[in-house]
Image (cartoon, rainbow, N blue to C red):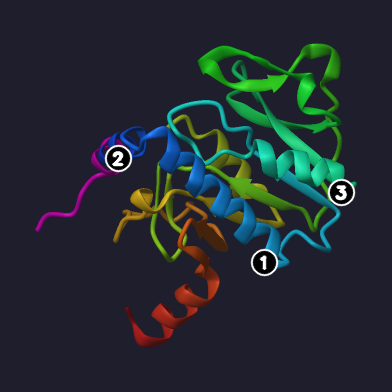
Amino acid sequence: MPVQSKQDIRTEALRRRRGLDAATAAANSRAIEVTLAGSGLLRDVSAVLAYVSAKDNEVNTHGIIRGLLAGGKTVFVPVSDRDRHVMRWSRLEAMEELERTHFSLLEPASRFVRIEPIPADAVCLVPGIAFTRSGWRVGFGGGYFDRFLDLFSGVPIGLAHGVQVVDHIPARTYDRPVDYLVTEAGLTDCLELRRNLETTGG
């Protein structure tokens, strides 16, 4: 069977994600939120970088963000710079600071943008169209998260519905996989899985 291209994987996984009915997508997101909260991965970090779910049945992060803010965590959300094709991170103080922007994204209104240095031990909640269980991902293709993760020193955690998990994604040498993946089925330690695959030559 021929290896699928990233574009083919993106098209099929996005079709499956969009095909989830509202009740299933909501139940999956809630299960992911509960698993993440119970995992301990966010407990002792100084800051959490979180994408803000906005379209196409993305795993809903609004409850996660509200919970982190209520618990006194420092939360950063993305602000895309279309001129430089980079993504910056703005410290968020309340969900009400967000507004709908280009590409139907939710980003802080200009008066609430607070660009600050990211702590070295931060955790980043990473979106994606498709993931493998070993942590490789396919995004929308704009490269914003890819460029950010290439320089990120903290822990990246992918969030996805189970229908987005695929067996294989062709990886480039400069791609960076996530360290953990959370779906409605639970938490996968992608780092450990990759170590095992390297040991066995898989």
As drawn, is 183 to the left or to the right of 197?
right
Magenta stretch in the rendered image: 1-11
Q: Earlier in the sequence, mark 3 or mark 2?
A: 2
As drawn, is 190 to the left or to the right of 19?
right
Residue wearing tag 2: 16
Q: Earlier in the sequence, mark 1 or mark 2?
A: 2
Q: Are marks 3 and 2 in contact (CB under 8 Å)?
A: no
Q: Quadrant of the N terminus?
A: bottom left
Secondary element at tag 1: helix
Above or below 30: residue 84: above
Residue 71: numbered disc = 3
Inspect the image, locate mark 2, and give the three-letter code of the amino acid beneath it. Answer: Arg
Inspect the image, locate mark 3, and give the three-letter code of the amino acid beneath it. Answer: Gly
Q: Tell me the crowding category of disc 2: few under 14, some 14 to 19, or many 20 or more residues within 10 angstroms, Cα based.
A: some
* Front in this rendered view, residue 184 or 1: 184
Residue wearing tag 1: 39
Residue in the image at 85% along x and 40% along y: 117
As drawn, is 58 to the left or to the right of 44?
left
Residue in the image at 39% along x and 59% along y: 132
Q: Quadrant of residue 22?
A: top left
Inspect the image, locate mark 1, and give the three-letter code of the amino acid beneath it. Answer: Ser
Residue 201 visible? The answer is yes
Disc 1 from disc 3: Cα separation: 16 Å
Above or below 54: residue 197: below
Task: Give the residue furthest to the right.
Answer: 72
Above or below 161: residue 111: above
As drawn, is 159 to the left or to the right of 78?
left
Secondary element at tag 3: loop
Above or below 75: residue 172: below
Is residue 6 highlighted in magenta? Answer: yes
Q: Position of residue 135 (x, y in %)?
A: 47, 60
* Front in this rendered view, residue 175 or 182: 182
